[in-house]
Amino acid sequence: MKSFRIMLALVMLFASLLWLLLGTSAPVYAIISERAQIIPSAIQATFGATIVWIIATILFGRIYCATVCPVGTLQDIVIWSKRKANPKKTFRFEEGSKIRYIVLLAYLASLIAGIIVVGYIIEPWNIMRNAASVVRPADTAMTLQAAGLSVGIGSAIGLAMIVAILIWAWTGGRKFCTTLCPIGTALGCLHSQSLMHIAIDPDKCISCMKCEDVCSARCIKVSQRFVDNSRCIRCFDCTDVCPNDAIRFQLNRGRHRQTPLMEMHNS
Ligand code: SF4
Ligand code: SF4
Ligand code: SF4
């Protein structure tokens, strides 16, 4: 499952970059990658991709974040490079930040109020598009001007956002995805009720910590046999690394915090 998702993510990243750099002269499969994104489908009011991803999230969770979003895949490449550079540096569980809900509410309020500049700065696809306007200024000029930004400022903001997100990924994993991205938080709200979940089997877990070590969303707490599925980006790194098949992608069982009998007895 992990290999398939990595392959798909790299293909989608390549296709997205082609579209961002070449525009409508890109090959058809690159244009399809743009149509598969949530934000363009919402902006163009076609909503096809948005509806598909809402249904997919309800069924399987945030697979959009692990496969199709180019900002997510760029972060994964940085996280992978960091692992190669320093294999001993591992991730640890962090409580989910409430900031993500405040950002989501501010983002929705700005959309309702017609202040589209907020979306242009923080939506992942627009971050990529703004940065790409360095190469294709004419194609983004109109939309940036509609948001009250010049092409120069728009591309500077896009590039600065990408650099900041990737530095954050190097130091803390998928922090942008679990703290600031309004699309990720909105999907996470659906996702926490999704049909399929990542869950730890307390009877099989041997507390080796390997899954918590690799979780870039920092949403696994082995000591409590707990996975915060609202932040899980369905990378399947944890299921791949577990030596005992104790953490699995499964139908919605084990949603609640599970505490092994031994720990309950000791506490
Ligand atoms: S949380 Fe946002 S930036 Fe991260 S992968 Fe999902 S949509 Fe992309
Ligand atoms: S819980 Fe597993 S699948 Fe979810 S983000 Fe963490 S490592 Fe990836
Ligand atoms: S990798 Fe498997 S056995 Fe190890 S702590 Fe995680 S769930 Fe438990």
Image (cartoon, rainbow, N blue to C red):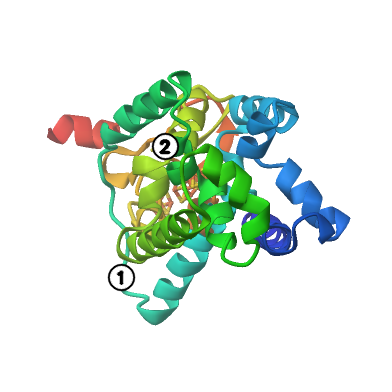
Residue 138 spot, x, y in % from top left = 66, 57
The structure residue drawn at horizontal position 40% and vertical position 65%, both measured from the top left corner, is 163
| 115 in relation to 135, above or below | above
Q: Is residue 176 visible?
A: yes
Q: Amino acid at mark 2?
A: Val
Q: Which mark is residue 71?
A: none
- Farthest right residue in view: 28
Mark 1–mark 2 distance (CA, rounded to whole Å): 35 Å
- Where, by quadrant of the figure, is residue 94 drawn? top left
Q: Is residue 257 visible?
A: no
| 252 in relation to 215, above or below | above
Residue 83 spot, x, y in % from top left = 41, 72
| SS for dot 2 | helix
The structure residue drawn at horizontal position 48% and vertical position 32%, both measured from the top left corner, is 116
| 222 in relation to 4, above or below | above
- Farthest left residue in view: 267
Residue 122 spot, x, y in % from top left = 43, 43
- Observer-side mark, 1 or 2, equals 2
The structure residue drawn at horizontal position 80% and vertical position 54%, both measured from the top left corner, is 24
Label 2, on which residue? 118
Sequence-earlier tag: 1 or 2: 1
Mark 1 crowd level (few <14, some 14–19, many ≥20, 10 Å Cα): few
Q: Amino acid at mark 1?
A: Lys
Label 1, on which residue? 89
Q: Left or right: where does residue 24 sit relative to residue 91?
A: right
Residue 193 spot, x, y in % from top left = 50, 22
